[in-house]
Image: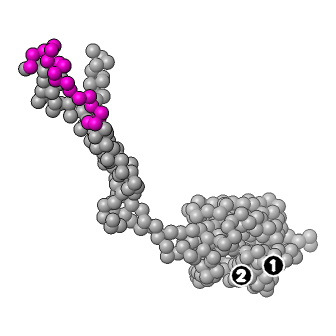
Amino acid sequence: MSEAGFQFAHPGWLLLLAMPLLVGIWLRLTRARDDMERYRAYADEQLLPYLLARHGAASGRRWQRPLWWSLLWILLVLALAGPRWDFHDIQLFRPGNDLVILLDLSASMDVKDVAPSRLLRAHQEIQDLIEYNHQARLGLIAFASRPHVVTPLTQDGASLRLQLPALTTKLLTLRGSRPGEALLRAGQMLAGQPADSGRHVLLITDGDFADDQSVEIATQMAEKNIHLHVFGVGSAQGGEVAGLRRRDGQPILSALNEAALEALAKAGKGLYRLAGYQDSDTRDLLNFIDETAHAQVLAQQKTRVWNERFYYPIGILMLLLLPVFRRTWKDASA
């Protein structure tokens, strides 16, 4: 049967179409034979056809009910067989890439050595990821001294985008920057994903932290096929951290520590990019994720979805049954 034309989803049910014929044969074979000689003793010859319901009109009505129920049976069997035609192909996609974004919300992210500020520049990087991403599921963790899961892994980029305006340095009250804790939390989120999926972590920070465990944690994650990528936000010249002073009253200065961030990305077998105003850093990251994906087998596979039409015979069946319900209602109300 042609895939492009009419067909049945479950053609095995069509074998039941022979049931009315088999029932008719059985009724014919098991019907009691008429003994005309026996009845002639009780009625006249011309009255016997009416007595035995063998008059022409009566005989015709006798076959109406079996034919009507046979029609209903045929419609029911056709519906069970699943008539269908017309189809469309759907591209198969398995979410085989997962990316957890770690956003630094420490006080140094408010420095304005890059316009409009380091934090808003980081927000723009996340927005670019949401816009250009078409495969990876995204999760977001904000951290300072402690990590906080903002959004679990999801394909709904719009919901993640809605969270960005609320992510300020005032969200987390504990001061300091400890990316190691955030890396551990990201590893826990990715641990539950399939082993054959591509697992990635993106750290967006200015590198103004002293966390000796970060490199060691990144190395351990790389051994588990979890890649750590880093986007550095800020400049080498740096700037003052607003609202913070040293004990001697001097302002606290913060500058981008690219050397430490590059070493962290190298330990995590990922990319390091300086977060710029162009989208080349985002595209490089997404290309890296695509190239290292383990779930590309399904990329060119499609599934065929047919337009099922079983409701057509069901609809006709219901219309034919309406007179039965009408007669039943009249008999009940009489």
Marks 2 and 1 sit apart, C-alpha to C-alpha, by 11 Å
- Residue 264 image-quadrant placement: bottom right
**Foreground residue, 326 or 105?**
326
Q: Residue at x 92, y 72 (%)?
A: 248
**Foreground residue, 73 or 30?**
30
**Foreground residue, 305 or 293?**
305
- The residue at which mark 1 appears reads as 219
Q: What label does residue 277 carry, if any?
A: none
**Crowding near the residue tagged with mark 1, few <14, some 14–19, many ≥20 C-alpha atoms within 10 Å:** many
Residue 291 colored in magenta in the image: no
Question: Which image quarter is the N terminus in?
Answer: bottom left
Describe the colour scheme in one phrase.
Answer: one colour
**Which residue appears farthest toward the front when viewing the image?**
37
- Range of the magenta residues? 27-45
- The residue at which mark 2 appears reads as 270
Residue 44 colored in magenta in the image: yes
Q: Please provide percent x and percent y for residue 65.
A: 24, 33
Q: Please provide percent x and percent y for residue 146.
A: 81, 63
- Residue 201 image-quadrant placement: bottom right
